[in-house]
Image (cartoon, helix red, strand yellow):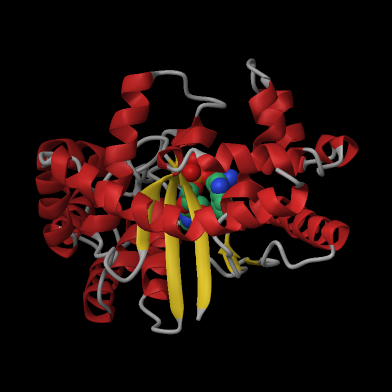
Amino acid sequence: MARILTGIQSSNIPHLGNLLGAIIPAIEMSKDPANNSIYFIADLHSLTSIKDAEFRRESRYAVAATWLAFGFDTDRNILFKQSAVPEVCELTWYLSCFMSYQRLQLAHSFKDKSENLADVNAGLFTYPVLMAADILMYDTNIVPVGKDQKQHVEFTRDLAEKMNHHYQQEIFVVPQEKIDENVMVIPGTDGRKMSKSYNNFINIFLPEKELKKTVMSIVTDSTPLEAPKNPDTDNVFALYKLLGTPEQVADIRAKYLAGGFGYGHAKTALLELILDKFKEQRDAYNRFMNDKAMLESELKKGADKARAIGTPVLDRVRKATGF
Ligand code: ADP
Ligand code: TRP
């Protein structure tokens, strides 16, 4: 049984890029009976950049509601919020005392962020050690992450080996990252990579009227309605292609090529496709967001299971280090 673990930032409602690029593939992976998946909301990490308490709370619910709406099975797997098992902060301390300061200074992600952010706090600097604690606390074998997080998993592996070697015992399971090199890059409403940072994202959970506004804002060229259009250079078609069945996509492609089919028509078709394809998930998401008690109880169930796995690991560390 391989234990798969990954952390999900709790910053805002997951968008279509997050869903197609990360959430849906992770849920698919969790269905393999040979795997046991632990997915958690990295709310402690979010404090490095987000200071607004209400925003953190709401984003946490939104992330949990999304995973549940897309069918993540929390009976067989674990979904929890990082801060519900604060013992991870204790483990962070032990790991910090084995983490080389010089090596942390070389972290790409810190360098990037510290050059671009106004608030360069110590939490941002020690971020990879908390991440290592997340991974090592739950005897993780595999960590699916984006390329930007690869180095953090390497730090984690080195820390595990360093402490195992120092104390001459198998305190930690040594984890391995899993980078999906061919993960699709989902384009946003302006054709660039869909991202919160570019404000070009589609939130599929919006009420129909607002969702329509987002879809209508997709950038297109000025080919007149009557003229034939090239589907392969159009942002609306690019999104339609990712969501439609092969028959639906072939049908719309033919309409582009024939002419007499305007971008307004294409956008309406895309909106209908989103509403139809995600009907069940949109309904479930809204139901869950209106039932915070249910979300809390799901997250608590996950935290209890996570703690049961994490406590013996932490005990191994305490014992080995003489506490
Ligand atoms: P954002 O760029 O909106 O801040 P994050 O960096 O929080 O998104 O991404 C969370 C997860 O979603 C990551 O695993 C990332 O690879 C995936 N993801 C984000 N945007 C896209 C996209 N446009 N296409 C594919 N995957 C994406
Ligand atoms: N740092 C990760 C990100 O920015 C989130 C994260 C926190 C994480 N802890 C983790 C990912 C542990 C994998 C394993 O996306």
Quarter-of-image position of residue 108: top right
Is any part of residue 230 visible from this angle?
no
At horizontal 51% and vertical 55% (from top left) the residue drawn is 310
Give the number of callouts: 0
Nearer to me, 120 or 323: 323
At horizontal 35% and vertical 46% (from top left) the residue drawn is 15
Q: Residue furthest right?
A: 102
- Point out residue 58 in the picture as x, y percentages from the top left corner: 28, 31
Quarter-of-image position of residue 140: bottom right
Nearer to me, 249 or 17: 17
At horizontal 54% and vertical 25% (from top left) the residue drawn is 49
Q: In the picture provided, is 37 more to the left or to the right than 99? A: left
Q: In the picture provided, is 181 more to the left or to the right than 279? A: right
Q: Is residue 308 above or below residue 198?
A: below
- Point out residue 218 in the picture as x, y percentages from the top left corner: 33, 43
- Point out residue 123 in the picture as x, y percentages from the top left corner: 64, 27
Q: Is residue 114 above or below residue 100?
A: above
Is any part of residue 221 visible from this angle?
yes
Nearer to me, 176 or 116: 176
At horizontal 70% and vertical 33% (from top left) the residue drawn is 126
Quarter placement of the C terminus: top right
Nearer to me, 280 or 81: 81
Quarter-of-image position of residue 79: bottom left
